[in-house]
Amino acid sequence: MIKRVATVFSIALLLLSSLGGITLTSAQQPAIRVMFNGQYLNLDVAPVIQGGRTLVPFRAIFEALGATVAWNEATRTATGTRDTTTVALTIGNNNATVNGVATRLDVAPIVQRGRTLVPLRFVSENLGATVQWVARHNIVVVRGPAPAGRFKIGIMTGTVVQTEEEFRAAESMQRKYGRDRIVHTTFPPRFTVEQETTISNLRALAADRDVRAIVVVQAVVGTAAGMEEVRRMRPDMLIIAGTPGEDMDLIARRADIILQTNDIRRGVCIVEQAHRMGARTFVHYSFARHMANAMLFQRRQLMEQTANRLGMRFVFADAPDPTGEGGVTGTQQFIMEDIPRRVAQFGTATAIFGTNCGMMEPMIRQVIATGAIFPVQCCPSPYHALPGALGIAIPADRRGDLAFAMSAIARELRRLNAAHRVSTWPVPVNMLYIEAGVEYAMAVLNNQTMGRVDLVTLEGILMARAGGPVHLTHLTTARGNYFHYFLFLSDYVDFTTIP
């Protein structure tokens, strides 16, 4: 056990060191680059940003998108035509046309070093491409209109009873691409003792020769063995695993892409978020069984160190274990009674955090009742405990509709004057891993990435699905560096800004 704890601590330190220096100063920012279908465009004039829009030489982007290019010197108008769509833009004019219909531009085309530069996003999206700005790398990722393709993508999730969020995300992908393109299966409810079923279901996906990628979220016990079977059957299969529940090195050797929440680094991020929300005291609820987990204990230590760095008081609150004599009910009752005592002692500038899912609903209720601060759940997600704590019922036809849930939560928090006191991540991570995993698989299979492992494209897709910045870093363990194993962090939701 001592050896295992030491190993986890060494991994934690390596993970933290790999996250240093994410933010670059303006002097260090690299020049803007444009990646089109996995290749960087060779531009004779560098892209520029004006009014928050990226402008690029018009001929380069039109031709990359497969458009026929025309230039009218008399009117100084650039025109690109692809299939049945024609886009025309005039230097210095904020009015462009798409198939003859006038459209207002945020920024007009300009001349730079003898070249006409046009708004990249406007041109690309009107000619059927997708555009993602990956600010951390100063790269604009453009993926052209994808061919129809005959391939399928398999998704494995838990059942609707186990993990409804993931199940609904798979259904969402089926609605978007069709059930003939997205094949959905589940792992068994008792997956720890029914690993053969998990393996069998993965084999069944691989047996369909049209399935060329498999997305597994969560990658529960038995997934590694199942992926090994898939590799024997189909060595070319693209495998994307989210939230692995098995040994990190084991999963890393079997999947092409792995996505996992960076729970250790959250020890810093959660306290920093609480501090931004006005907290001067941070109360951490947990119990001995969780603190015996090396990773959770390391996170608690980082929380205390971060609180000290920020000049905050750190308080560890020993709560009853929900697996103990009192059960979940006993733990919840303790939370209901103890939070008011803590807030009375330390004031409303007190952030409350707990390590157990069963604590979340009563914790949120008492935070709102006492006017304290709730930075995030143990498992960040708008769906986790917030609707229940706020008495929000999600209609059957709105299950999996994140925008509906976020608006309902924001409205109720505003009614309770607590929108500025509660935050979470903007999207359930496991739903995100499924939806982004499918989109990434589509890009890889359509030859729109720099190979199977493309950090920039993956980060752009995750940002688009999350609706804001995300942070990806590579996993480093005592046994190696894994540049396809990504540790994920998200920014936080500000409920005061959600309509």
Image (spheres, rainbow, N blue to C red):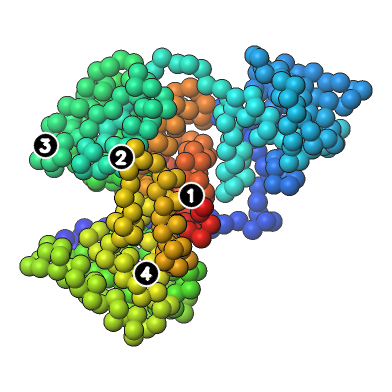
Residue that numbered label 3 is attached to: 194
Question: Which mark lies nearer to you, 2 or 3?
Answer: 2
Q: Is residue 222 visible?
A: yes
Q: Quadrant of residue 102?
A: top right
399 in relation to 279, above or below: above
Label 3 and label 4: CA atoms lie apart by: 42 Å
Q: Residue at 28%, 17% (x, y): give it.
A: 208
Q: Residue at 38%, 61% (x, y): give it.
A: 376
Residue that numbered label 1 is attached to: 470
The three-letter amino acid code for the residue at tag 2 is: Ala
Label 3 and label 1: CA atoms lie apart by: 35 Å
State which tag comes first along the sequence, 2 or 3.
Answer: 3
Callout 3: SS = loop
Percent position (x, y) of residue 251? Answer: 28, 40
Label 4 and label 2: CA atoms lie apart by: 27 Å
Q: Is residue 237 visible?
A: no
Label 1 and label 2: CA atoms lie apart by: 30 Å
Q: Is residue 198 left or right of residue 216?
A: left
Percent position (x, y) of residue 279? Answer: 44, 74
